[in-house]
Image (cartoon, rainbow, N blue to C red):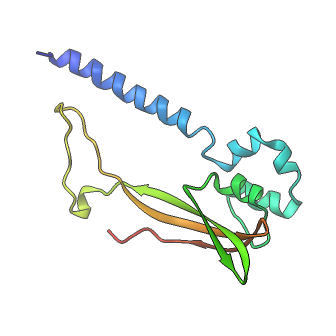
């Protein structure tokens, strides 16, 4: 049987491990990180697009590389057709953890000290390209609680 001190140490170690993993996995999670790792792509952009990308924004006419710098890699790529031309739509998914006020009960894991909140995916934004350029994009609101 595990005593209280061992549980506390295990809890701290688990928390530290999760935090370290999150930092590693989200290393390119911001436009700044992607720009710093790919300065050659950023330098090829116009000054206008550089300013937008730095703020995580896009515009019609932007290249796929510019959108990748601004928004990151899409969760899904969907081929399509528009006006007889091939298109590609990038979809971005976010995961929302509801709070107890949403009416969702807490879930406790196998140990009394672990809390594993549920995460619900939803589409947060999408962008469609034709000939490698943005022809349409949209930000989608999160679902209501």
Q: Position of residue 35 (x, y in %)?
A: 75, 45
Which quadrant of the structure image shows residue 36?
Answer: top right
Q: How many marks?
A: 0
Q: Position of residue 23 (x, y in %)?
A: 53, 34
**Residue plotted at (35% across, 54% down):** 97
Pick the residue in front: 128 or 54.
Answer: 128
Q: Position of residue 54 (x, y in %)?
A: 74, 54
Residue that lies at the very extreme toward the front in this rendered image: 84
Which quadrant of the structure image shows residue 102?
Answer: bottom left
Side (left or right) of 18 relative to 129: left
Residue that lies at the very extreme toward the bottom in this rendered image: 83
**Residue plotted at (73% across, 81% down):** 84
Side (left or right) of 97 relative to 8: right
Q: Quadrant of the C terminus?
A: bottom left
Pick the residue in front: 112 or 65.
Answer: 65
Side (left or right) of 47 relative to 89: right
Pick the residue in front: 5 or 69.
Answer: 69
Q: Position of residue 116 (x, y in %)?
A: 28, 42
**Residue plotted at (29% across, 18% down):** 9
**Residue plotted at (71% across, 59% down):** 67
Q: Quadrant of the N terminus?
A: top left
Side (left or right) of 87 relative to 140: right
Pick the residue in front: 3 or 134.
Answer: 134
As drawn, 2 above or below 123: above
């Amino acid at each position: 049987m595990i005593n209280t001190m061992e549980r506390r140490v295990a809890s701290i170690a688990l928390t530290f491990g999760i935090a370290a993993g999150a930092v590693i996995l989200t290393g390119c999670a911001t436009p700044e990180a992607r720009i710093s790792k790919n300065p050659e792509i950023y330098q090829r952009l116009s000054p206008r697009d550089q300013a937008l990308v730095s703020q995580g924004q896009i515009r019609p006419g932007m290249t796929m590389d510019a959108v990748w710098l601004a928004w990151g890699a899409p969760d899904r790529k969907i081929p399509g057709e528009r006006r007889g031309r091939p298109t590609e739509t990038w979809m971005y998914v976010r995961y929302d953890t509801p709070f107890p006020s949403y009416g969702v009960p807490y879930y406790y894991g196998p140990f009394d000290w672990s809390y594993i909140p549920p995460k619900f995916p939803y589409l947060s934004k999408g962008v469609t390209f034709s000939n490698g350029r943005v022809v349409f994009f949209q930000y989608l609101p999160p679902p209501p609680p």
